[in-house]
Amino acid sequence: MKYCRRRRRNMSKHDDQVSLKDMLSHAREAVDLLGGSIREELAANRVLQLALTQLVEIIGEAANRMSQPTQSRHPEIPWLQIIGMRNRLVHGYDVIDFDLLWDTITTDLPPLIDALQEIVEDA
C-alpha cells in the first residue's frame, strides 16, 4: 500500500484569499441550503443535518488555516468562535446541538457573509 504525503505549504496572502473565499462560499451555501426551512425541518431531515454540519465544519477549517496577520487585520471576524464551532462539531459529533447549528446558520452566518464579502472585494 502506498501512502501519499502532502507537502506543507507556508501560508501566504494568496492562501488566505483562497481560505476567505472558501469561508464565504460555504457560508452562502449553508444559508441557501437552509433556505426557507423551519426549525422542525432540520430536526426531521438527516441529510440536511449532515450537509449543514459539514458546511459549518468547512467554514471553521478554512478559518483555522488563516494566517495570524490576516486574522489580526480583520478583528470583525470572530475567528476563535468560528474555529471553536468547527471543533465542537468535529469532536462532538455524537452530541450535535441542532438548535446551536440552526442559530449559527440563521443568526451568525448572514453578518459573517457580509463581512467576508467586504474583505474579499477589498483584496
Image (cartoon, helix red, strand yellow):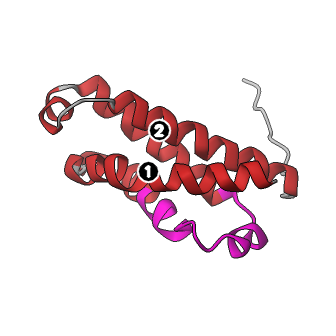
User: Which residue range is magenta in the image?
Assistant: 65-85
Whether residue 102 is in magenta: the answer is no
Which is nearer the eye, 85 or 102? Answer: 102
Residue at 78 percent of width and 32 percent of height: 4
Figure disc tally: 2
Q: Main secondary structure of the magenta part?
A: helix
What is the secondary structure assignment of the residue under circle 2? helix
- Residue type, label 1: Leu
Whether residue 67 is in magenta: the answer is yes
Residue 81 percent across, percent down from the top left: 46, 67
Which is nearer the eye, 98 or 87? Answer: 98
**4 with respect to 40 (left or right):** right
Q: Determine whether 3 is above or below 115 in the image.
A: above
Residue at 23 percent of width and 30 percent of height: 37
Q: Which residue is mark 1?
A: 109
Q: Which residue is mark 2?
A: 55
Q: Which quadrant of the figure contains the N terminus?
A: top right
Q: Mark 2, mark 1: which one is toward the viewer?
A: 1
- Residue type, label 2: Leu
Residue 41 percent across, percent down from the top left: 17, 29
What is the secondary structure assignment of the residue under circle 1? helix
Residue 80 marker: none
